[in-house]
Image (spheres, rainbow, N blue to C red):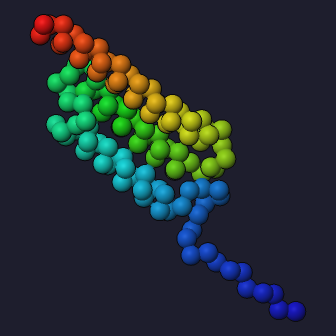
Amino acid sequence: MDKEPEIIEAEVVGKNGASNFQKGLAVFLLIVSALYTLSPIDLAPDAIPVVGWLDDLGVLSVATMNMVQQFAHDQNAVMVKILKYAKWLLIVAVVIAALLLGGLIAAIVALIVK
């Protein structure tokens, strides 16, 4: 009456938690986003008052939400699901706001130059 040995998976994953690779990637993305925020080279320069800060804040916020989501023990929790949709909503909102503010600034500059 020998019992069959259990098969142990190579990658240790907590109760419905994210894999170690996903957690490491989330930390890496947070570090890269922090460096992007501190860097003077941006998609929208920080010299443009609102748009320049908006892209930095958006990138850092999305990376932070991603890290919190990946480090949650229960990936089926309501908070994780909310963060999943909040990340995408924030990305869309930042892109739309940057386009609108960028267009507004371009229109103001065009009126001043005339």
Q: Which quarter of the figure has residue 58?
A: top left
Q: Left or right of 18: which side holds 47?
A: left
Q: Position of residue 55 (x, y in %)?
A: 32, 31
On screen, residue 51 above or below 4? above
Q: Residue at x 65, y 56 (%)?
A: 16
Q: Quadrant of the C terminus?
A: top left
Q: Nearer the viewer, residue 7 or 108?
A: 108
Q: Residue at x 67, y 47 (%)?
A: 76
Residue lying at the far right of the rendered structure: 1
Q: Position of residue 22 (x, y in %)?
A: 49, 57
On screen, residue 100 above or below 21? above
On screen, residue 104 above or below 8? above
Residue lying at the far left of the rendered structure: 113
On screen, residue 11 above or below 30? below
Q: Position of residue 62 (x, y in %)?
A: 43, 38
Q: Quadrant of the N terminus?
A: bottom right
Residue lying at the far front of the rendered structure: 114
Q: Residue at x 57, y 68 (%)?
A: 12
Residue lying at the far bottom of the rendered structure: 1
Q: Position of residue 60 (x, y in %)?
A: 36, 37
Please give the count of numbered marks on the rendered protein: 0
Q: Nearer the viewer, residue 46 or 26?
A: 46
Q: Residue at x 65, y 58 (%)?
A: 15
